[in-house]
Amino acid sequence: MSNPYPYCRPLLAAALVAFLSTSHTAAGADAPGREASDEGDRGSSLHAAAARCDLWSRGGYDLDAADGGASLSTSPFRRIAPVRKGRRVSECLGSQLRVRGGDDTATASIDERIGELTERYGPRFAEAIRKNEEEHAADCRLSCESFYCAPASANKAAAKDWRGGKSTGVKSYSFGGLPPEDFADDFGFPLDLIKVTQDEPLFSAEESATVLRNAIAEGVDANEYTSGKYKLGGDWLTNLPETRKWFNSRLETTLFPLLADLFPEVVSGPSVLRAHSVSLLKYNSTHPRTDVHIDNGILAMTLAMTPSSEYAGGGTFYEHFGRDDVLPMDVGHGTFRPGSVRHGGHRVTDGTRFILGAFLLIEDRVEHVRRLKNRGSDLRNKNDLDGAAEHFEWALAINPRCATCLKDWAEILMTRKDFEGAEAKIRRVLELLDDRDSDALFTLGVILSEQGRDDESIASYRKSLSLNAEDSELCFNLGVKLAASGDSKGEREMYAKATQINPKMGKAWLNLGISLAESGKLDDAEVMFIKAADCEPEVKPQALTNLALLEKERVQRALAGGDAAAAKTHGLQAGRYLDEAKPLFDALIPLFPNDEGLRHYASGFDQLRIFVFRLAGAALMKLGEFADCEAEMTKLVDMFPDAWESHAMMWTMHMNTGNADGAEVCRARMNELRAGAGLPPA
């Protein structure tokens, strides 16, 4: 989850503001009854059926349909035994289906829908649809250049023979409360759309080990790329020819026939399936997990390539299951699902886990919602907010329950400072997903904060944290809001948690240091500022500034205690920190012109540096080191020739060393600058 509204506190603000404010001076009967009872029983039965559908879709209970009925379980596992979709659909109310997807008798075909929307939106919409179709066709053609594409003859025989004599079973799990974003009305209720193989694996551990040896020989082990907030090892199969050769053979004999069998709602046969964006991924303690995300394809698969005995942790986390409910797979097994379910790779804490992931297209079905949404995101990245919003509106017109479309639109509204409109979009997402979307809750927290509704913002962040406890940006933002509410302990706990999740999160180390410094723990704060400076280049100048502020505090304490030597040491070190920070500010501000925190620091830099010069000069004067003091004051005037304070300090030095002529020159220049600033002469 990227955060477009970072809340980095003005660090050590109290100290800096205090300085600036003083800078010029201190630098269930009978027959009739039975008939009524029957009627009541029918109503009760209908009500129970609706309740079962709703509960199951929310992932809140297991359904046991072994005897044709259903029982509610208090098990924490949100699991369901294999259920035949046709029988289960007939048990649910039509009105429920219209809410949750699958009542296609009352739904216009996608072509009819596109036609209606073309009349409504006109030629720009029609052009976007044409572009979707062209891009889809091109992507399908490109897929066949690298990956197996089945002939039409495969639709008759192979689709029924994916097991190859094995006793492999398939277990179904809830997809959650919303159908897939594309072809939503084709998926019947219940939405048991997460399919996981069980019993005998699709391929053996030995076969997988051979595949991995070949992949490592092809360099997969050494590659790395960024995925959201995390780094992953691995590579695309287009770069791994031997691994791709194996995968293509499995597409032909196993995977495409299996997918056609699992998803007959949208897949007419193996010949229409197209693999694209296929990668072999490596997880370990340094590349432990992925963000919670959705996949960029109507269907997706994950194949476990490593025995579970070789790593700790791992597995796939589905947000609607709950954060502690991880779906594991042993080597040779696979998970197959529509791509738009929110999920992530769970953290690997020890050992190494390889998985093969693939997104899939369906040649005779264009994913108009996904393509419109993706193009809208591209337009937003190009700062064409009107074009982006238009594409999100079109995608929502095709599928009004497209949660990611609503979230993307909300981001545009946030950029435009329309926080009320953004809030409405995000609350619609949370209504659709029964509040089970940590990103939406995070965004709601930001929106509420922007409106000054801090208590509501904190509540939203906490709810998001209950779904996804390993989001460093979430922990950071919650820490900032807790700080604003006066909860210093809670603030520090959140920053510490953020750094545990992401040890390279400089902002969290920085704010943790600030909180410690404000509580008087300067030595502990110093450690945090040094970590911040080492971790994140974008916050290094702020970290250096805070280190300088710590040294400033030490100078003042030393001077008050009569320890001029210590004051000199700390004063000169404060100056070195600030001199290192200055070119970093100059380089970063043009790159991040809207970073309020960066501007806050840069705007106060000059006065802070002048004040540090003054403190160091005072220490040197007390020590009688007049030559060094003059060198510092000369450096001050060279750096800030148009600041009256610079000449005032040089004047003071000359007066203390008996240089009357030098003092008079400095005094004249000082008063000239003071007059220009509307200040009386000194």
Image: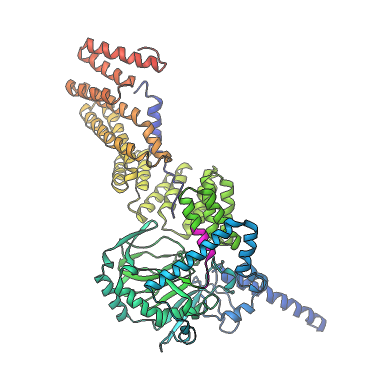
Residue 609: x and y in percent read 31, 29
Residue 206: x and y in percent read 29, 81
Q: Is residue 492 above or below residue 269?
A: above
Which residue ends up furthest to the bottom in the rendered image?
165
Q: In this view, does 166 lie to the left or right of 191?
A: left
Q: Which residue is drawn at 20% across and 15% down?
A: 657
Q: Residue at x 27, y 30 (%)?
A: 555
Q: Quadrant of the C terminus?
A: top left
Q: In this view, does 339 lie above or below 657?
A: below
Q: Examine the image and state in which quarter residue 95 appears.
A: bottom right
Q: Quadrant of the N terminus?
A: bottom left
Does the segment drawn in magenta span residue 97? no
Q: In this view, does 326 lie above or below 7?
A: below
Q: Is the magenta stretch mostly helix, strand or loop?
A: helix
Q: Is residue 212 left or right of residue 79?
A: left
Q: Give the range drawn in magenta.
A: 364-374
Residue 308: x and y in percent read 34, 74
Residue 533: x and y in percent read 30, 44
Nearest the viewer among 118 and 444 is 118
Q: Residue at x 51, y 46 (%)?
A: 415
Nearest the viewer among 54 and 124 is 124
Q: In this view, does 249 lie to the left or right of 620?
A: right
Q: In this view, does 538 lie above or below 348?
A: above
Q: Is residue 663 left or right of residue 446?
A: left
Res 69 visible: no
